[in-house]
Amino acid sequence: MTTSIQNLDPKAIESLVRSAVTRALTGSSSSRTGLEPYKPNLVVSISARHIHLTDEHVEKLFGPGKKLTPEKGLYQDGFFAAAETVMIVGPRRRMLPNVRVLGPTRKASQVELAYTDAISLGIDAPVRHSGDIAGTPGCVLVGPAGAVELVQGVIRAARHVHINPKDCAFYGVNNGDFMTLSVKSNQCSVTFEDLLVREDAAAKLEVHIDTDEGNACDLDRATAIELKKQQPCKCHEH
């Protein structure tokens, strides 16, 4: 038998409405509290000395028709450490053997070193962002099939952050901004400034620092790591 709503007592109707609203609100509240707040998956990597090559230089160093052989994928999708290595020769025949080539190939060859690497080679390598090699020192690369003389391209890679739009929004930064990385450890806590934000839709959140910087902050034994937007310097404001 169906009961018409007109036949229900007003107090019964009110009770049913309150019950329905309470269930709806309770369900919504549970759903909200059940969702964990978004937290980026921050990875900090030490970028050891390496080389980027053009297709032409790959063939000169490793032989005609030679292509790079992917050996290990890097954290960023599509990039890899190749099986191939070369020797870097600096002034006065100072050398670094077996330096890893990273792929894929690029439009311009580039050597990325830490400060101590550059000192070892006798090269005054400037701190530059990747790809900014105009006016930088050169070197000689030696492979199993030949040698290449670079007239420029040796840099100390500036620390930077690979980041996607979602994580940019989380940190409140945009492409080209700078961030600060604080690394705490039991022995030596270090704060690195001026990490360039390199936004890309396909990027996974990853900070790159070089070997010297990784050793300075004892990254392997870090107890806490914090990444945040770098505030504009107010030292010259009056």
Image: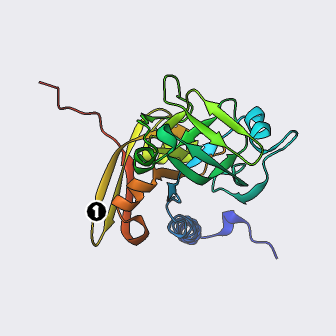
Query: Residue at 43% across / 49% down in the picture?
Result: 120
Q: Is residue 141 left or right of residue 136?
A: right
Which residue is more in the foreground, 142 or 196? 142
Which residue is more in the foreground, 222 or 80? 80
The residue identified by callout 1 is 189
Res 199 → quadrant: top right
Res 67 → quadrant: top right
Q: Is residue 42 left or right of residue 126?
A: right
Q: Quadrant of the N terminus?
A: bottom right
Amino acid tagged 1 = Ser
Query: Residue at 69% across / 29% down in the picture?
Result: 107
Residue 6 position within the rendered picture, expressed as x and y whole percent measured from the top left: 67, 63
Residue 230 position within the rendered picture, expressed as x and y whole percent measured from the top left: 34, 41
Query: Residue at 56% across / 40% down in the picture?
Result: 111
Residue 40 position within the rendered picture, expressed as x and y whole percent measured from the top left: 51, 57
Placement of 141 over or under 144, stated as above or below: above
Residue 198 in view, yes or no: yes
